[in-house]
Image: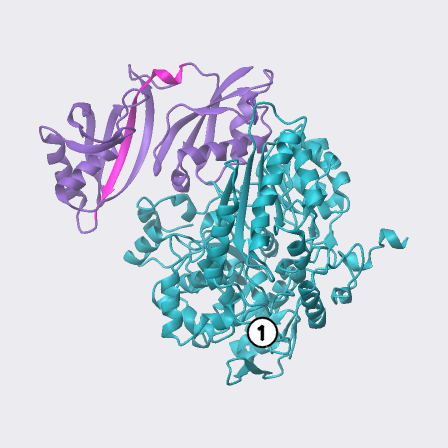
Amino acid sequence: MISREVEKILLNVQKPGRYTGGELNSVVKDKNKVDIRFAFCFPDVYEVGMSHLGMKILYGQFNEREDIWCERVFAPWTDMEEQMRKNNIPLYALESGDSLDKFDFIGFTLQYELSFTNILYMLELGNIPLLSKDRTDLFNIVVAGGPCACNPEPLADFIDLFFIGEGEEVDLEVMDLYKQCRANSETKQQFLEKAAQIQGVYVPALYDVEYNDDGTIKAFTPKNNAPAVIKKRIITDLDNLYYPESFVVPSIEIVHDRAMAEIFRGCIRGCRFCQAGFLYRPVREKSPEVIDRQCHLLCNNTGYDEVSLSSLSSSDYTKIGELLNNLTKWSKDENVSISLPSLRVDGFSDEILSKLKTVRKSGLTFAPEAGTQRLRDVINKNVTEEELMDTCSTAFNGGWTTVKLYFMIGLPTETLDDVAGIAQLGQKVVNAYYNAENRQKGKSVRVTLSTASFVPKPFTPFQWFAQDTMESLKQKQMHLKDSITTKKINYNYHDSSTSFVEAVFARGDRRLCKALLKAHEKGMIFDGWGDFFSLDKWLEVFDECGIDPAFYANRQREFDELLPWDHIDYGIKKSFLIEECKKAYENKTTPNCRQKCSNCGAAQWKRGVCFEKRENMV
Amino acid sequence: MKSVRIWFKKEGLSRFISHLDLNKVMTLAINRSRIPIWHTEGFNPHPFLTFALPLSLGFSGECETMDIKLEDDSFDISQIPDSLNKSLPDGIRAYKAAEPVMKPAKIALASYKLKVGCDGQSGEEICDDFHSLLNSESIITQKKTKKGIKDIDLKPYLSDYSLGIEGNEAVFSATMPAGSTVNINPILYLNALKERTGREYYYSAARTRIMDENGDCFE
């Protein structure tokens, strides 16, 4: 429960509901009756963090255990920060109101690189020393996991222990080890050394890094028996995996305010720019009965009237028809609508369409990612223009009048013609509307084209690629804008400077810790928010630290370079990534996992799509 | 179709739930409790509920009401408070459900209790400052309206009030015009006090009663 001191300041801040706790289904335990207190920190505001499915799963799973109390912590907005500092109120967890320094574990989820400054911001507000080496006790252990933990190096000085891969099992193993070490009065160092022996745990302090004269990495050496390679953890059986039966229901509006069910992990597609597509291999599905039961329970326990089926590519779920059939049996009577995000252009059938329409009609969004077929082949986004047009026609005939299309600019081998191709594709979609016979009469069409700037990520075939410079990206944005000739098309684009800083940290090494610390000293926070991000400030930080950001963002790496994340193993062979990279430059595509195995290495887990029967083999 | 008025308290942490968000909280609680609420019949059907008199963010409310319509006339409305309470966040508690007697437009008055504290000042001192403010010939402060900020004299609305002391805090209790025509928020008096003394105050505020023009409780 938050303190009287906090209540006093809440009337001076915007959206005080962010800071109160007390929501339906939030878990309050007696702190004297638990062994481990875990502060789950999301380095962004409440509304963003509370929308995150991973947090809901781990929160529920930790709290299932009687000996663990997991609480939630979010980054306070600056008006609250000001009030907290003025009144000497440290950052606290929502359930107990206790400050971060009262917790055994302080865990951060790393969802995007631009949230890194907020990690330091939250630690400092919670009275936790920033540097791992300054925290010497077996207490206040700072841990982190999530997709950005795949290259943990830019955070190596701050985080004691990283979870690599899927967290459900390894988290609990580390909790048990902690209890054991504490009972034996062992030191933090002893605990970390033992933890490093668990598969999926990375303790950065147990590794030394040496550099070459040109700034690249020379050697990466483990100490104290730490493994040379840290292998990710993976859940092999999703049907029997813990899934929350209820969510904490926020009392204020959040970004994704609905029930969510995970239908599968991984993605069969192998789009070459997509990090998630490689990190979460192989594809493992949940069975439709399990998903149906979980959705129904969640809706009953939260009161939500919308459930979203979450995955990297919903229409690739093999039993989508059966699942939608099961769901619509009860959802219609209970006024619950089903939403399917991440639909692929080629997976949009009449059947799916009619099921989605039964209760509510939302906007349609597709991501062709590139404007020309050649470039879509380069990135292995195996979607053809014909498929896109067919899909749009289906949608228009089904009554839809707005379509959003997502693209990236700055992709490898991209030319200005590829960029103009985006505008041409948009025009063809507009034309498809007017050729659709059953379109809504008397209504105009709206096509929104949206471009993000490509950021090369670790563990993708483009991990060696030099990011386009900001100048070049801006030029491409203007070229696209000039190529649009109709008012029925809206164009919006993401600022290229945030993508630049993101690229620096995505493929950075340990020397960037210095820059993060400097940025923190300068008060930089919420870099993912346009209101706060400042390229000038970042350039100043890099300059003062003697770091050349272009070395990380805009430098083409050689295949034989030792990369900062090469000691982390996601089960994907580096030789496979090299092969994929070469094929990209030859405009050659790779079939998806259900069509043909491309021998990426994920079959070592002996589960999922790698062991399904392929139709063409039967 | 049957109309039902549900009375609830909104206290503690729940006073930081805004009016708009309260709508969402109640909608989810009703969905969860399976009360056969009537849904709107438009493009996006949603459960229909209305609140008689919005409560300012930060205020606790001791007798708030919400009106819903039921699809099933035979539904036993006495069980509504209990089933809703299982689905509401900390601080919101339904305590009565009955058929509405008055129309929300009848609301004309509301009573409030405002506790005011100030670091470095005793309850007596705050009370004295309050007293001299309320005794001045006019109490001018600014009020935000839809058309912008305008000056308002609070003196004419001050007919039924009392000042007291509880520990280090002054307590201002008053009955003010409320409803859709004239609505006076007691915080305006605190704002006027701030402007006069230049001090920073903290407060807790509660709406304790909602009435029609005759002072009869809203039913």
Residue at the (49%, 32%) spot, across then down: B26
Q: What color does chain A have in the rendering? A: cyan
**Quarter holding residue A381:** bottom right
Residue B108 pos. (x, y %): 30, 19
Residue holding disc 1: A557
Describe residue B163's horizontal placement relative to residue A582 as left or right: left
Picture colour scheme: by chain
Q: Which is nearer the eye, A163 or A348?
A: A348
Q: Is residue B123 visible to the viewer in this orientation of the structure?
A: yes
Q: Main secondary structure of the magenta part?
A: strand
From this view, report whether residue A276 is shown above or below residue A354.
below
From this view, report whether residue A428 is shown above or below residue B207.
below
The numbered mark 1 sits on a residue in which chain? A
Tag 1: residue type?
Answer: Arg
Question: Tag 1: Cα neighbours inside 10 Å, few (<14), some, or many (≥20)?
Answer: some
Was residue B151 drawn as part of the magenta stretch in this picture?
A: no
Q: Secondary structure at mark 1?
A: loop
Q: Which residues are magenta?
A: B102-118
Chain letter of the purple region: B
Residue A328 pos. (x, y %): 71, 33
Residue at the (49%, 34%) spot, across then down: B24
From this view, report whether residue A317 is shown above or below residue B152.
below
